Amino acid sequence: MKKKPQKESGNSGTRPFVLVKAFTVSSLIVMLTATIVIAALNAHWVRKILLEKSKEYNRLLVENLNHQIFLRFVWPVVFKHGEIKLREPGQYKLLDTVIKSTLHSFHVEMVNIYATDNVIAYSLDKTRIGKKDAGGVHYQKAMKKEISSTLVQQGNWIELTFWFPKETKIITFAPLMQEVQLTPEKDRMVIGAIEIIRDVTEDYQQVFKLQGLIVVSCASIMGILFLILRFVVKHGENIIERRAEERLKLEEKLRQAEHLSAIGEMTAGVSHEIRNPLGIIKSSAQLMEKKMAKLDPSSSIPGIIVEESTRLDRIITDFLDFAKPKVADLRPCNMEDIIEKNIAFLSSSDAHKQIKIIREYPGDLPNILGDPAMLYQAFLNIFLNAFQAMDREDGRMTIATWHEPGFVHAAFSDTGPGIDEDLLKKIWTPFFTTKEMGTGLGLGIIKNIIQAHQGEITITNAQPCGTRVEICLPAAPQNIEEE
């Protein structure tokens, strides 16, 4: 029942970004499609302009050819022979020379001249001479003084579909006119028709290359934009996922805190209820121990009751210390002085005399704002945990202190076996312990005290062996120290 809201919470956090991702992808697809369509329309527009320019170019070419034929062939032949007979080699050669010299370097592939009876009288391809009715509709238009142009493209269906034919030719039919009018009122007379076929494949291929360049450029820009937006969206998704995971972890910690708070309240209440009868049992056992010393000195039962009662009282004290809020009475104090009080107390105990203490003090440590009594208890628990983990004969504990702007540090390193990496993640869990007689609240009490001082505590494995406990506490402000 609890996991379902978490899942919905995570989805609700990522759902807006999923919509943004979908909108981004669809927008890019639409933009790319629109770009390709616009590029195709631009290419079509360029081809249309090219066709119009080609038609205009052919008209000018035909007009120039018409002028040269009339000036350099028709007039001289009529003047000299009286009539035009292209079957005569001399006249045909003269016309061929005039046409080829006029169209030289104009990339004209074919020229056909039709007589008034729709028969090809002249052609660059001599096999076509004498062919009848070859002009078709365009010939008829030319005889009516109309100029018409058509575009002829050749290639397979793929080339024709995507507008890059293998060959592109423009065919223009125009009337062959006499340039000298007999009377001012009469129009110029049509004496035949001229067909010009010009290859414009190279021009259209340039248009296709331009079209391809536009499409590829736009697709590349869209692709780069897509990758950038994809990276941004992915990065945003990762941020959302991390925040969702952090939120879930915070919610889990909040539930654990609420659970621990309820346990703490219950533990505090139960501990108070147990402490009173426990005190009565302990005092009664002490009285019984005194009487049994006279009646049966060998009996150890009253002593065991006293010892176990003392141990239970210590456990209850740990429960109460862990459950009740820590409110520190902050005042300027020296961390090294508090540590030295712990060392002096432990040195008087026979159980810890063999442990060697190594001090690494800088000598100029600034004061901290702390509660000496609470810090004394926290440091004492650290010392006891370290002493219990070390061999009493050759155990060593190194205490190092240092400071940085605004903070004072203390590190406690022992030569014990250290903590397994799997257990290192669980040491802050309340009631977790590896000791047979432990309550699992010692480190929790230390952490509560350090946090009450706005400090931090970390526990790691030292090298080459042992455990390292590092504490960081805020330094006392200068104005408070002076007061």
Image (cartoon, rainbow, N blue to C red):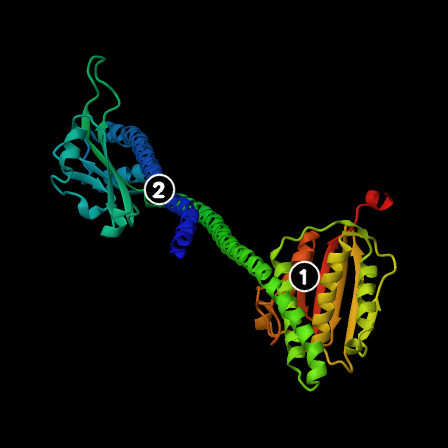
Q: Which residue is pictured at 29% across the width and 33% down the height?
A: 55
What amino acid is found at the position of numbered circle 1 in the picture?
A: Ile
The structure residue drawn at horizontal position 60% and vertical position 68%, both measured from the top left corner, is 440
Query: In the picture shown, does residue 166 fall above or below 119?
Result: below
Q: CA distance from mark 1 to mark 2?
A: 62 Å
Question: Where is 320 relative to 155, above or below?
Answer: below
Picture quadrant of residue 350: bottom right
Q: Is residue 250 left or right of residue 32?
A: right
Residue 446: which disc?
Answer: 1
Q: For the residue labelled by badge 2, is the local secondary structure a helix, a strand or a loop?
A: helix
Quadrant placement of the N terminus? bottom left
**Residue 232 shown left or right of residue 457 in the figure:** left
User: How far from the left and from the top, in percent, is residue 288?
Assistant: 67, 76
Q: Nearer the viewer, residue 412 or 149?
A: 412
Q: Residue furthest front?
A: 295
Mark 2: give few (<14), some (14-19) or many (20+) Cα within 10 Å: few
Residue 222 placement (x, y as % from top left): 43, 45
For image coordinates 21% across by 46% down, the residue present is 126
- The tag earlier along the polypeptide, 1 or 2, is 2
For image coordinates 76% across by 59% down, the residue present is 409
Q: Tell me the number on the disc at residue 30.
A: 2
Residue 213 appears in the figure: no
Residue type (three-letter) at the residue carrying disc 2: Val
Does residue 12 lie above or below 84 as drawn? below
Disc number at residue 120?
none
- Which quadrant, please, contains the C terminus? top right
Q: Secondary structure at mark 1?
A: helix
Is disc 1 surrounded by few (<14), some (14 to 19) or many (20+) residues within 10 Å?
many
Question: Residue 130, how many percent across, how many down?
Answer: 14, 42
